[in-house]
Amino acid sequence: MVENKAQADIALIGLAVMGQNLILNMADHGFSVAAYNRTVSRLDEFLSSAAKGTSVIGARSLPELVAVLKKPRRIMFMVKAGTAVDELIQELVPLLEAGDILIDGGNSLFTDTQRRCAELGAKGLLYIGSGVSGGEEGARRGPALMPGGDARAWPYIKDIFQAIAAKASDGEPCCDWVGQGGAGHYVKMAHNGIEYGDMQIICEAYHLMRDGLGMSSEEMQQTFSRWNSGPLDSYLIGITADILAVKDADGSPLVERVLDAAGQKGTGKWTGISSLDLGVPLTLISEAVYARYLSAQKEERLRAAEVLKGPESRSEAGREGLVTDLEQALLAAKIVSYAQGFMLLREAAREYKWELDYSAIASIWRAGCIIRSVFLNKIKEAYLSNPDLLNLFMDSFFRETLEKCQPAWRRVIVAAVQRGIPVPALSSALSFYDGYRCARLPANLLQAQRDYFGAHTYERVDRPRGEFFHSDWSNKGA
Ligand code: NBP
């Protein structure tokens, strides 16, 4: 029973794992939260378990929920992305009034958020699409939050969002306004793409150590732990060390019993699609998505493994040196991945007319989220000292690190290729680096081929850009 009207600071709809934990986090920070879930039994369960003894207010219908909110109403939802969000909005809109604020904290596709923002804006409602990262634990103890949408709503949610967000080592909240329309969800999508890349390069290092160098899980566990106190210090390296330490009932490493067929929820794919739409060479993240697809073709791979031959994969020659090299290869590939990720953000900002603050984005990602790492402090500093930085490679710290790491990085790729161990992300990152620093790529030949078969024309190196030529290539260039 709701006795006092208009007492809640914010409503949260969707009591699955993320919603419940965000509510408890908000309540911990002194906010009065009203909770609602489509399936009411879930609300009852929540109120009698995790939320028992807290100030959380349960609402059993949307009108009841709306009635307990202070104005302007702030309503956040953590429901399944896609049609569920549209259905919920449709039900809510007739209950709201101009100036009320709707916040979608799910992993919605940014174009959906752009559309919802415009449609609801026309009705006088303020719409926010916010990236929420850090999974269940982040939601409970402090996530990284990436809100974007109608900027007029920001002053009304800023206090709550910055209070519940993770805090970086300097105390800054990992939450800041990202930009208009779908900018918040776009930045979250890019975050997830980078997460795909980080995970893939770690998996490639593990593959090379396990199958190429014959290392035991204990040895790999120690290696990842050691790396986690150096420049690779990050959540994902840390959990990899934890995973390698876990034993199955018979004492053997549990990770080796896990089926090697990766799942995905689509945000990496969206990042790849967006890079193709915007013409950004996001090679590492795209390779990471494809690597998951290849892994999922388990039955086909099993058949192929019986007939397709390669070199002997295991060779322990130079093992110690290669493990040292791997750390540098991972660092270099990580720089490429983030450089590409920020290239994508820059192009998206241009295309969708967002004013993205790259330093602030790196700052948000420093804690609470899955890609948190010490490395992000350096990206934050790079964009802070030069907001117009053309590419992370051009920042002196990253340029010098790449210079230092590249001999080791090349040795790792050679070792993997010689052993027939796939390293699509580590190697495509190196190819990108070599391509990016190449003043003359072979695209001259490509343009000639296009002109040969399709009269697509070409520009000349000895004439100004914008002048186009066509030659009769089949007739010896006449
Ligand atoms: P789910 O993505 O599993 O969604 C379940 C929730 O959506 C339930 O509360 C369900 O209500 C509700 N829902 C559905 Br399904 N259809 C609905 C509709 N038409 N109207 C109202 N509610 C509806 O929950 P989650 O894993 O907590 O994730 C929530 C959001 O946060 C998702 O967008 C997810 O991608 C994103 N996210 C998740 C994580 C994570 O680690 N899980 C991390 C970051 C972001 P019901 O109980 O009545 O079925």
Image (spheres, helix red, strand yellow):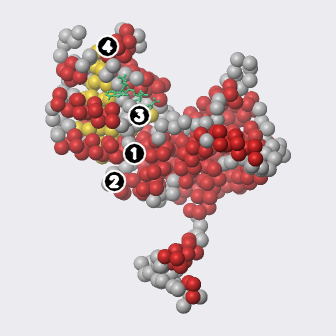
> In the image, what residue type sits under mark 3?
Val
Q: Which comes before the other along the chain, label 1 or label 3? A: 3
Q: Image height check: is 18 above or below 236? A: above
Q: Nearer the viewer, mark 2 or mark 4?
A: 2
Q: Nearer the viewer, mark 4 or mark 1?
A: 1
- Give me the C-alpha separation between circle 2 and circle 4: 41 Å
Q: Residue at x 47, y 83 (%)?
A: 469
Q: Nearer the viewer, mark 4 or mark 3?
A: 3
Q: Callout 3 environment at 10 Å: few (<14), some (14 to 19), or many (20+)? A: many
Q: Which comes before the other along the chain, label 4 or label 3? A: 4
Identify the image quadrant of residue 433: bottom right
Q: Which comes before the other along the chain, label 2 or label 4? A: 4
Identify the image quadrant of residue 347: bottom left
- Give me the C-alpha separation between circle 3 and circle 2: 21 Å
Viewer-side residue, 293 vs 417: 293
Q: Image height check: is 236 above or below 23? A: below
Residue assigned mark 2: 352
Question: Viewed as shown, does residue 82 lie left or right of 311?
Answer: left
Identify the image quadrant of the C terminus. bottom right
Residue assigned mark 3: 132
Dot 3: element: strand
Judged from this view, the residue extending furthest toward the bottom is: 478
Residue assigned mark 1: 186
Q: Name the disc covering residue 55, or none.
A: 4
Q: Residue at x 51, y 53 (%)?
A: 282
